[in-house]
Image (cartoon, rainbow, N blue to C red):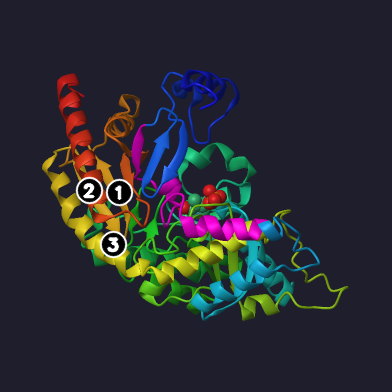
Amino acid sequence: MKYSYEQLEQWDKQYVWHPFTQMKQYVNERPLIIERGKGSYLYDVNGRRYLDGYASLWVNVHGHNDPELNAALREQLENIAHSTLLGSANVPSILLAKTLISYWPGMAKVFYSDTGAAAVEIALKIAYQYWKNIDPVKYAKKNKFVSLKEAYHGDTVGAVSVGGMATFHRIFAPLLFERIEVPSPYVYRMEKYGSEQDVVRYCLNELERVLASQHEHIAAVIVEPLVQGAAGIIVHPRGFLKGVEALCRQYGVLLICDEVAVGFGRTGTMFACEQEKVAPDLVCLGKGITGGYLPLAATLVTEEVYAAFLGEADEDKTFYHGHTYTGNQLTCSVALKNIELIEQRGLISSVQQKARRLAERLDALYEIPIVGDIRQKGLMCGIEIVKDRRTKEVFPRAAMVEHRIVLEARQRGLIIRPLGPVLTFIPVLSMSEAEMDEAVRILFDSIACLYEQVRMERL
Ligand SMILES: *Cc1c(COP(=O)(O)O)cnc(C)c1O
């Protein structure tokens, strides 16, 4: 290796500002500096290996350094890396759009971008302009968006506007457009509303109340279908998503499904909407779309939405939006190969099978008294850590219990991340059963270790 760990550490701390990171704390810790990856493992510059239990931020599908994805990328590179979609087309972006639409019978068109937040931003702008294009007078007031409590849709100002996570979003409030918040079925913390289905009913009633009184002011409802990821893996009970769809239809507002986290097999089906047979008006895709190789995102829309943007040159119905690298050939070609391999390798059914086994293994974590709730959909898992299982009180933030569990796990060879009091285990989708068993063993030991520590500290 060209540079020592110590040299890289120094430059990292001197020059790099890490996302979502309190740098004052970061510079006091030894950074993890990744050098390479293979399959389910990441290797740091010192040659230590770690199971990738966060799929390199929920993106990795087939494992790292996949020979076939590498080959697809090399092959494309021999032709061209990039040309623009503004006024011209390219082969991989055409083929990928056709492939994506084949999974979404209700959808007609694909609009490319490069991050999930941009895909959301685009969906919001399209939804807003859709109403103005159809009838600027009748729909003049349809300017607001509805989203769920604790919603997360990305970090650009538009995406933050529909976000509901106080810690991330509160500071930006004066910059944001108006959002109407409705409750989401966070069953673990809503026991006062009754059973799972009571919670769903309550949430849908609240949404209906908002739509009934304000639908004339509402352009769209945006939801993360089935699982609210960044909120702490809040798994919605069956029927919620379908109920949201029905209310959107009833009250004439568009439905945007943000599949950025849940798409591409993560929840046990290619896309989450399939599980409740929901057909949104707009869909946002990102994260797993390139198998975790390159940044790419897409917004899919129905023919009805698309048609509203057709007009003469002087009508101003055009969607004036686009990013420089839209439809980039390298990203689109690796995305195409990713999807082809998902089919070829039977990844979806293997995810379902592995998810069942994982659920049994994770159950053992309840032996540790600070494990409050374990939530899982497919290979998306959240373990909520509590100080008191009965009251569900969480540990004080300053004690950084969850962060310390994550560091323990890293010592033992597993990389995971906390989201508030929730530990997330979101493995590379191709992770083997044996590797996943090992990951759960490490999770158990790391949480048990912190349990002992907090008892000693009398937290
Ligand atoms: C990650 C995420 C986004 C944002 O995607 P970026 O690529 O980070 O911009 C949007 N929506 C959901 C549901 C996500 O999980």
The residue drawn where x is 31% and y is 42% is 423
Please tell me the numbered disc located at residue 147: none
Please tell me the numbered disc located at residue 373: 2
Q: Residues at badges 1 and 3 in contact (C-beta under 8 Å)?
A: no
Q: Residues at badges 2 and 1 in contact (C-beta under 8 Å)?
A: yes
- Mark 3 falls on what kind of element? helix
Distance between mark 1 and mark 3 Cα atoms: 20 Å
Q: Amino acid at mark 3?
A: Val
Image coords of residue 23 (percent x, y) = 50, 25
- Label 3 sits on residue: 199
In this image, 254 relative to 456: left or right? right
In this image, 251 relative to 111: left or right? left
**The magenta stretch spans which residues?**
48-77
Which image quadrant for residue 355?
bottom left
Q: Is residue 342 above or below residue 41?
A: below
Image coords of residue 348 (percent x, y) = 36, 68
Between 68 and 277, the one nearer to me in the picture: 68
Please tell me the numbered disc located at residue 382: 1
The residue drawn where x is 34% and y is 38% is 50
| Label 2 vs 1, first from the N-terminus | 2
Image coords of residue 278 (percent x, y) = 43, 75
Q: Amino acid at mark 1?
A: Gly
Residue 70 in the magenta stretch? The answer is yes
